[in-house]
């Protein structure tokens, strides 16, 4: 039941965000005296509607977004709308370019404000990731030594059938800091993933694990450690064991019986309403950088996304649709991870805001780019004492618009299909 509640709440959050996006367009258009004829939440057949002034407000049956109709977005639309002569000064394209820019950017601005507001509430009053915790996870190679090599992933404790841990017999102790494995520096180093020349291990600990798994089993290797401020070396002979996973499958893994020691600082902190502003700004900047990097990697994720539809394991780094995001939201609520739920909603708002500002039609960023292209082109013509070239003919841009739409629709169908037949799960 909690899963369904979370799924519905997340889907509702998306719908509210998109509706507020359209309300941003409508509000700024009305502020500048533009003629707004329709504002609807949803698509498809109309559930109900009412008219207030010159605008029809309503809800449609398919809750997948919304739209606002501003008269005369282009000269061609002004003709199609059959705008009365006395209203022509109110159509969109006749307004100053700075007003049109504000109206077009208002939707994304709403997403940024909404995302930042939720983030500020989270870091101020609920919980925010502790940077010190993340830093310790990423850089620490302090170890906990096990008594055995557990051969069944469904168990957390040793049994009689488990072999003794080589790390213990080799003299390693819990609290030691691992410095080198067989001469390979693992603490504080940018380690390369084995078999690659460029890809970095994400943390010092993963660097250490990869170095251990690359050791020949049964042959002693030198482990350099730090204990009580002193540097020591220990001989440890790793073993290859068959580990039974929770899915019943077995896998051979080279191990010595160590794990990363739990962090000494809490995973989350709260900043309060004043310091929360600065924390939210910093986190917004970090999220923007990561989002930019993720967006540039989308094309290279397409093959893995396609293959996942036909039975290959779904990579957790592949893109998700609103369907997949809602399912993840359901899992987070089911496991009482409300912080993750809201951070996912924040990320989605920031993503929609950025994506919508790309300078491509039919996105708002494309309309802004054309508006300023017209402005600059007219200014250059005036400086050269040449006739004003006038407005861009949108009909000539339709092939490009249809191409972008086709890519967007194809990508949406691909991600939705993958999220239905092979969804990303966090806890299963």
Image (tube, grey):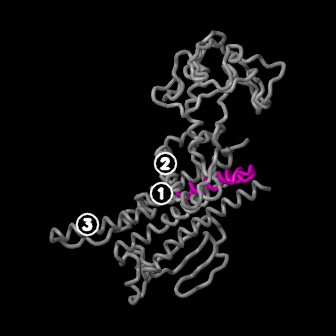
Q: Which mark is residue 377?
A: 3
Is 344 within the magenta?
yes
Q: Is the residue 425 above or below the residue 345 in the image?
A: above
Residue range (magenta)? 327-350
The residue drawn where x is 42% and y is 74% is 73
Q: Is residue 159 left or right of residue 293?
A: right
Q: Secondary structure at mark 3?
A: helix
Residue 38: x percent and y percent? 54, 78
Residue 225: x percent and y percent? 59, 20
Residue 232: x percent and y percent? 58, 16
Marks 3 & 2, CB-CB < 8 Å contact: no
User: Quarter holding the C terminus?
Assistant: top right
Q: Is the residue 294 above or below the residue 73 in the image?
A: above
The residue drawn where x is 54% and y is 24% is 186
Q: Badge 1: how crowded within 10 Å, few (<14), some, or many (20+)?
A: some
Marks 2 & 1, CB-CB < 8 Å contact: yes
Q: Cα distance, mark 1 to mark 3?
A: 26 Å
Nearest to viewer (mark 3 / mark 2) = 2
Give the residue at mark 2.
295
The residue drawn where x is 62% and y is 50% is 269
Q: Which mark is residue 354?
A: 1
Q: Is the residue 181 above or below the residue 34 in the image?
A: above
Nearest to viewer (mark 1 / mark 3) = 1
Q: Nearer the viewer, residue 52 or 405?
A: 52
Q: Badge 3: how crowded within 10 Å, few (<14), some, or many (20+)?
A: some
Is 345 within the magenta?
yes
């Amino acid at each position: 039941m909690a899963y369904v509640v979370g799924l519905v709440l997340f889907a509702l959050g998306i719908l509210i965000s998109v509706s507020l996006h359209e309300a941003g367009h409508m509000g700024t258009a009305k502020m500048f005296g533009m003629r707004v004829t329709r504002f609807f939440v949803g698509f498809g057949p109309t559930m109900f509607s009412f008219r207030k002034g010159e605008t029809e407000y309503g809800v449609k049956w398919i809750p997948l977004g919304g739209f606002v109709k501003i008269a005369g977005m282009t000269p061609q639309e002004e003709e199609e709308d059959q705008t009365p002569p006395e209203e022509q000064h109110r159509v969109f394209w006749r307004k100053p370019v700075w007003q049109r820019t504000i109206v077009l950017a208002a939707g994304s601005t709403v997403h940024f404000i909404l995302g930042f507001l939720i983030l500020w509430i989270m870091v101020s009053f609920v919980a925010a990731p502790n940077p010190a915790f993340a830093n310790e996870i990423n850089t620490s190679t302090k170890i906990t030594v096990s008594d055995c090599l557990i051969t069944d992933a469904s168990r957390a404790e040793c049994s009689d059938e488990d072999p003794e841990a080589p790390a213990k017999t080799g003299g390693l102790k819990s609290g030691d800091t691992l410095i080198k494995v067989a001469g390979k520096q693992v603490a504080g180093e940018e380690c390369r993933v084995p078999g690659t020349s460029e890809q970095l291990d994400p943390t010092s600990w993963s660097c250490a694990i990869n170095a251990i798994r690359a050791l020949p089993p049964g042959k002693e290797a030198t482990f350099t450690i730090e204990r009580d401020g002193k540097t020591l070396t220990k001989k440890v002979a790793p073993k290859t064991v068959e580990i039974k996973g929770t899915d019943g499958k077995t896998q051979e893994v080279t191990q010595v019986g160590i794990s990363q020691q739990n962090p000494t600082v809490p995973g989350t902190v709260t900043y309060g309403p004043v310091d929360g502003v600065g924390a939210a700004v910093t986190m917004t900047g970090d999220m923007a950088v990561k989002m930019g990097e993720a967006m540039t990697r989308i094309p290279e994720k397409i093959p893995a996304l396609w293959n996942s539809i036909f039975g290959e394991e779904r990579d957790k780094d592949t893109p998700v649709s609103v369907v997949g995001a809602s399912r993840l939201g359901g899992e987070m609520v089911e496991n009482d991870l409300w912080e993750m739920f809201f951070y996912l909603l924040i990320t989605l708002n920031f993503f929609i805001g950025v994506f919508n500002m790309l300078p491509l039609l039919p996105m708002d960023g494309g309309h802004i780019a054309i508006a300023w292209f017209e402005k600059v082109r007219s200014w250059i013509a005036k400086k050269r004492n040449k006739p004003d070239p006038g407005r861009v003919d949108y009909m000539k841009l339709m092939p490009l618009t249809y191409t972008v739409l086709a890519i967007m629709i194809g990508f949406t169908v691909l991600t939705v299909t993958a999220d239905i037949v092979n969804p990303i799960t966090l806890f299963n």
